Image (cartoon, helix red, strand yellow):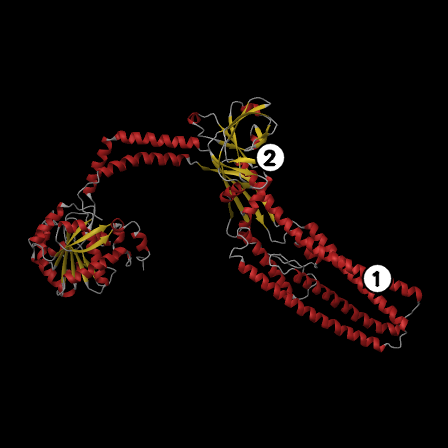
Amino acid sequence: MKQRPETQIDLKKLFFKFVAKWYYFLAALILCVGIAYIYNKIQNPVYAVNATILLENENAGQRGTSELLGVVETQKKVIEVEDQIGLITSFDMIEKAIERLDYGVSYYIVPDAWINTFGDLKVEERISDNYPFKIVLNPEANQLLNTPIYIRILSKNKFQLSVEGGQTTKLYNISTNKTSAEIESPEINKIVTINEPFQDKHLNFKLFLNEGHEEYTGKKFYFEVNNKNNLTKNYQKRLKAKAISRESRIIDLQLESPVVDKDMKFLDTLVSVFTETDLIEKRQTSIKTIEYIQTQLADVSKQLATAENDLTSYRSNRQTDVTVDRMNVYDKIDQFNAEKQQIASRIRTYTDVLNYMERNQDVATNAVPATSGIDSPVIITQVNELANLYQQKQKLLLTLKPDHPSIQPVETEIVSRRRSIISNLREGLAARRQDLRSVEQRIGALYGNINRIPENESQLRNLQQRYEYNDQTRNYLQEKLAEAQILLATNTASKRPVDKAKVGEKTAPKTNAIFLIAILAGLCLPAIGITVADMFDDTIKTKEEVKNATNIPILGMIGHSDGKNAILARTDNYKSSVSESFRSLRVNLQYLVAGTEHKTIGITSSASGEGKTFCAINLSTVLALSGKKTILIDTDLRKPKVASYLGMKNMAGLSSYLIRNSKLDEIVQPTKIKNFDVITSGPTPPNPVELVELDEMRELIMRLKLEYDYIIIDTPPISYVAEYMVLKEYMDANIFVIRANYTRKPVLEMVNELYESKTLHNLSIVLNDINFSEMYGFDYRSKTRGYYQKA
């Protein structure tokens, strides 16, 4: 846009007004900087405290053993980092960490700082290890909650206890973790013996002196009793957890802490609780497997003892030998018996798992059976999916109540999956029983073929087979038990700490930024006050002001833009709010010059900087985009701008054509917009008025009318020079550009005289640089931003 000397003059006047009232700035600076200094003194420094933890696969620590044994099935599961972040930042996990720490009491010291002469403005929190005494609360008694309880050490045996009365507080019971209704704190001022309990209906505790308490003589102390739930919520709100990178499995835990020792201990404890919880869950799974195998082993051992007794008794009464021929038959029987044993073992497993599932039908029971011995991949997959559903439900219960709507779909899926498992187990059991009957039929057939074998030999063989079957089953279960016990002994957590908690950078208060804001406020506040008082200027700001001052029709309004970047012929931004404003202007212009085949439009203003060149270029652009062949002539031979706005050369142009140094085809320059050509001003002449009065100017207009639908003429300001009055005879319509918050109201009087005297034909006004947000509300821009976008 054009330079605005008037604005510079206004700014200069405003500057001198500021200088004349320098004492306002001095007072504001002293006040704001003083407040910033006191604020920085009161605030305790806050540091970032960080700890990191590594997430491994869920079977980490036991995978090597399971692969070595190759018996106990373990499904490798990838731990979702987002789920683990939700778990470690859950209320339950943080509460477990706090329960391990002695954070039921917060300790404070009022340092000897000059700022505290005006009250306890600066207070520092300490941990009990760095404090002259330690408070031990009676967990069964009620305690004043979040109320300062002041302590003054009088001697090695006595201390003074004081509580300011009249404060609104509550009573808190540690053992029940419940608070009472709001009460008014009592006023307490008593001398109490150290190491002896202080008992009151509002307080019940003991005070023990720490080593080095003598150095705190004369200091002011107080402590507060914390609500465990509120303390947990506070840590949950402050705790930030995220992966150190997108693909990383290392979680960074961070707290912004004014008491770094306290929060370092908390983070280390939280990581410890997190890893221990994971290990406990793994051990519980292994223990369930061992218990199941032990139950089966006890039953088989009883059956083996019975078979052994029967065999021993039979042998003591009879002596039986088996011939080689008969042994061949029995070998086949042994093979079928071995197959029978395997089938019978599977039947027992299917029966036990089916009974287990049918006994635990309640959806609230997290019943997932062991799948060792199940040979159906479908059932094993369904059991693993059921276990995943229970894990999903447990994660939801960490943050939601059991009756929450989000839990119902999971419970429905659990019921459906359990029914499917039971159905498949029944089908599998029926199939195994059918296999067993088939094998038994084959064994019966073999026995029928050896009817010549004496009965005593057959009985002995049966007893031996029963004994061997139970013995093999027992050995198999003992092997499984040993493997499961090894897995239990070698279980390790799938999470482990990487870095213990450590102190990072200081995060608050940002002293320099606070002082900078204070200085800016000290400069801006008086400047704003002085400027507001000087707001009563005489510039045109709204469409209504134009209507009230003149009867000239308003052709259109152009919204605020950023100058050259809003030149449509250079930006291609044809869907911006500015382009839409000029399209509306084009439509209105067509009504204004209706009936004229070749239209010549003159655009002027009262002074430089009001946007006439900006309007001329953009109006020409939208006319060309609508299919109208358009040419723009820069007749402002004194301060031409068209060439610089469009990035064109200005060696030859209107001035060189009027003095016959250039031909028409030499001065017409095309733009990248189809149907849009430009004639720049050319070299600056010494006599602009005389040039535009030449017949060559009339000839130029006539020739251009034969070739173009629209001729847009960018003329000099009408207030300063006479060229426009010379050029007005060529105009079919005249547009006067007014810039909001720039053009002064007296200009309208001059334009109104030209309109009423009919000096200018077909005159209308364009109101440029309108701030629609101020006219139609603050959210106007946000509501239209999505509509006006780049193509």
Where is mark 1, residue-wise? 306
Mark 1 Cα-neighbour bin, 10 Å: few <14, some 14–19, many ≥20 = some
Question: In the rendering, at what x and y percent does residue 219 appear?
Answer: 51, 25
Q: Quadrant of the C terminus?
A: bottom left
Label annotation for residue 731: none
Residue 420 in the image: state x and y as whole percent. 61, 66
Label 1 secondary element:
helix
Q: Amino acid at mark 2?
A: Asn
Residue pushed farthest left? 757
> Is 651 or 262 nearer to us in this picture?
262
Task: Give whichever of discs 2 and 1 has the lower sequence position.
Answer: 2
**Residue at the (23%, 52%) spot, across then down:** 645
In the image, 520 versus 651, the foreground residue is 520
Is 436 rendered above or below residue 557? Answer: below
**Label 1 amino acid?**
Thr
Total labels: the figure holds 2
Residue 629 found in image quarter: bottom left
Compared with 426, 609 (above or below) is above
Label 2 sits on residue? 138
Q: Is residue 425 left or right of residue 79?
A: right
Residue at left 77%, top 69%?
A: 340
Q: Is residue 292 left or right of residue 497?
A: right
Instruction: Give the answer, above or below, for where 675 lies relative to 227.
Output: below
Q: Residues within 10 Å of mark 2 (few under 14, many from 20)?
A: some
